[in-house]
Amino acid sequence: MLSDIIKAGQFVDLQSTRKSEEGDETYKKLYRTKVFDVLSEDQLEILMPIEQQKLILLPVDGEYDLCFVTDNGLYQCFARVLDRYKSNNVYILVMELTSNLRKFQRREYYRFSCALEMSSRMLEPEEIRAVDRQEVYLVPGLPVKRSVIVDISGGGLRFMANYKYDVDSLIYCNYKLMVQGEPREYQLVGKILSVEESENRPGVFEHRVQYVNVDVDVREEIIKYIFEEERKQRRNEAGRRK
């Protein structure tokens, strides 16, 4: 039952597939937004996606692959835009399911083991309000804590620290990656999914983090970094075997 699984406020990724200008390739665009309300067992309302502070006016009758982020994992279905409207300054899309909702078994992103320095802190109230508006607003110059990223993906990261955050809290994450030979700084918002104390190192806590409102281009850069580092590792391993 749709209403038993999908709830208002849950994140949902929409992926469209359209023809390229040449007409012989497909281009997949991913948008992240939230569920606004479940209307019936085959219809729901979602907030209209926002990208770079602009509303994305998805066309009526457009078909999309939806992936819902729930407490019980990822769920996927196909749906089309039935209607779109504005209510109390909120822009809403009415989606009609065109397939059954199913558990999404595949991991969304591959995690790459690493050891990267990171700075983080809790979000300020005004920053949290921006997240609720599906925007990113970060207050500069606030004190941060040090930690080490131990794996990273296009969807989130895992880090170790001698302090711990509360589960479901929103944090500011700052780290640098080498992308195509150039150092690039990333300032992202993350949600704490889990916190566990290390069995071998008392007082050290492992945090799992999911990115929130991350720009699609930034996500692709992180994935590109992972691919580049994997290639380097394979070349190094091949060199040592010679």
Image (cartoon, rainbow, N blue to C red):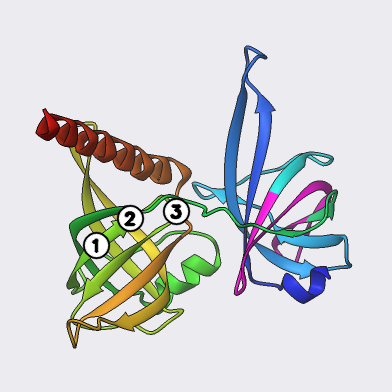
**Circles 3 and 2: CB atoms closer than 8 Å:** no
Label 3 sits on a secondary structure element that is loop
Q: Is residue 196 above or below residue 208?
A: below
How far separated are the C-alphas under marks 3 and 1? Answer: 18 Å
> Magenta segment range?
66-93
- Which circle marks residue 149 in the picture? 1
Q: How many marks?
A: 3
Picture quadrant of residue 190: bottom left
In this rendering, would 139 be left or right of 125? left
| Quadrant (top left, top right, bottom left, bottom right) of the C terminus | top left
Query: In the current view of this chain or complex, which residue is farthest to the top?
Result: 22
- Which circle marks residue 152 in the picture? 2
User: What's the amino acid at mark 1?
Assistant: Ile
How far separated are the C-alphas under marks 3 and 2? Answer: 14 Å
Label 3: how many residues lie within 10 Å, few (<14), some (14-19) or many (20+)?
A: many
Rendered location of residue 221, percent (x, y): 35, 40
Residue at image coords 54%, 69%: 132
Give the label, 3 or 2, closer to the camera. Answer: 2
**Circles 1 and 2: CB atoms closer than 8 Å:** yes
| Magenta stretch contains residue 76 | yes
Label 2 sits on a secondary structure element that is strand
In this rendering, would 162 be left or right of 102? left
Secondary structure mainly formed by the magenta segment = strand
Rendered location of residue 185, percent (x, y): 23, 49
Picture quadrant of residue 64: top right
The residue to which callout 3 is attached is: 214
Rendered location of residue 36, percent (x, y): 72, 67
Query: In the current view of this chain or complex, which residue is farthest to the bottom?
Result: 202
Using the image as rendered, state which of residue 201 and residue 203 is in the foreground: 201
